[in-house]
Amino acid sequence: MTATLLDGKALAETVRAEVRTGVEAFTQTHKRPPGLDVVLVGDNAASRIYTRNKEKASKEVGMRGRLHTLAETTSQDELLALLALLANDPEVDGILVQLPLPPHLAADRVLDAVPPEKDVDGFHPVNVGLLALGRPALVPCTPLGCMRLLAQSGTRLRGARAVVIGRSTIVGKPMAQLLLAEHATVTIAHSRTQDLPALCREADVLVAAIGKAEMVRGDWIKPGATVLDVGINRVTTSEGKSKLVGDVCFDEVKERAGLLSPVPGGVGPMTIACLLQNTLTAARRRLER
Ligand code: NAD
């Protein structure tokens, strides 16, 4: 068997087109576009690229995107003061603080300062709680993108056995909550799980969010399973070239899985598309409350 690949790039384009249409309607009704404010503290090279891409993507769908770049030495009080300004600005619909923050800043206190209704990353305790309760919430973008990929693929979730490898608050835990809400029977595996390969072999749906290059092997996969590879790992090939690989050993797993998301081009592109969707959702909910 060779797996059918889940095309996240194409689906992300569809989501962006939906958001663009929604943004046009919002702008007509409210006489202003939805606004996304992205906050970057420090000089992390990857974060600089991510935040620029988010700002650019928001503008491409017609939003007012703004990037606030603060020095590495910014104090907690200075950052909280900016967040208070954005929290009270009626034209700011979404606020995103790029992680990781420099070590002298307390990420929890900073994330708590983003009002839940503008928390387009879905990291505020209120949104985490609402998701756990199965009530409408702003949901973290990567798991939201995974769910959209699953829906598009036609994978049956009701009654399915799902295994999520990884228990981060950004991917693993919210992913498990979303699968549970769709009536899958969900197991969360992590670094201390015993006999991970055997557990994975039971999975109709396997989500790998580990951060370890090509860890999930072909013989861990139940034949025909749907496999979502969230991992993004940069490795050096035997020819000395740098390339991106997932947490799944693609060449082996594609021979056993029914559906498989590739890296790159699978889950990755869905994340920014879902950030745009969350921003539109946040804008609509605030103004239509
Ligand atoms: P994290 O480091 O916060 O969490 C990793 C999880 O993997 C932990 O819960 C840990 O218990 C588990 N783990 C580690 N080693 C393990 C092992 N040997 N066996 C089983 N479980 C193990 O990482 P994260 O933020 O959740 O990200 C995970 C991966 O997803 C990374 O590669 C990251 O780059 C990628 N990611 C991609 C996107 C995207 O847009 N596609 C978004 C976020 C994260």
Image (cartoon, rainbow, N blue to C red):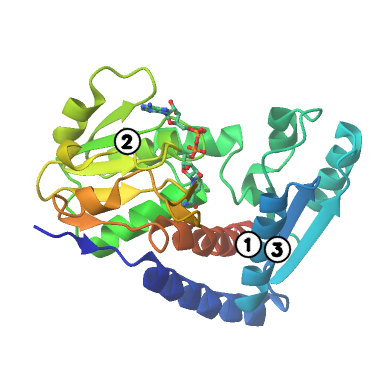
User: Disc 3 versus disc 2: distance between alpha carbons?
Assistant: 30 Å
- 274 sits to left or right of 65: left
Q: Position of residue 90 (x, y in %)?
A: 78, 59
User: Which residue is nearer to you in this view: 211 or 234?
Assistant: 234
Query: What type is the residue that disc 3 sits on?
Result: Arg
Query: What type is the residue that disc 2 sits on?
Result: Val
Judge the density around disc 3: few (<14), some (14-19), many (≥20) Cα neighbours within 10 Å: some
- Report the residue marked by disc 1: 283
N-terminal label among 1 and 3: 3
Circle 2 — which element? strand
* Location of residue 287 with respect to 216 vertically, above or below: below
Q: Nearer the viewer, mark 1 or mark 2?
A: 2
User: Which residue is nearer to you in this view: 156 or 250?
Assistant: 250
- 254 sits to left or right of 82: left
In the picture, the quarter occupied by the C terminus is: bottom right
N-terminal label among 3 and 2: 3
In the picture, the quarter occupied by the N terminus is: bottom left
The residue under the point 67% across, 42% down is 99
- Report the residue marked by disc 3: 52
- 288 sits to left or right of 222: right
* Location of residue 50 with respect to 163 vertically, above or below: below
Q: Position of residue 156 (x, y in %)?
A: 16, 52
* Location of residue 49 with respect to 14 vertically, above or below: above
Mark 1–mark 3 contact, CB under 8 Å?
no
Query: What type is the residue that disc 1 sits on?
Result: Ala
Quarter occupied by residue 195: top left
User: Which residue is nearer to you in this view: 141 or 49?
Assistant: 49
User: Disc 1 versus disc 3: distance between alpha carbons?
Assistant: 21 Å
- Report the residue marked by disc 2: 164
The CB of the residue at mark 3 lies under 8 Å from ligand 1: no
Residue 90 in sight in this render: no
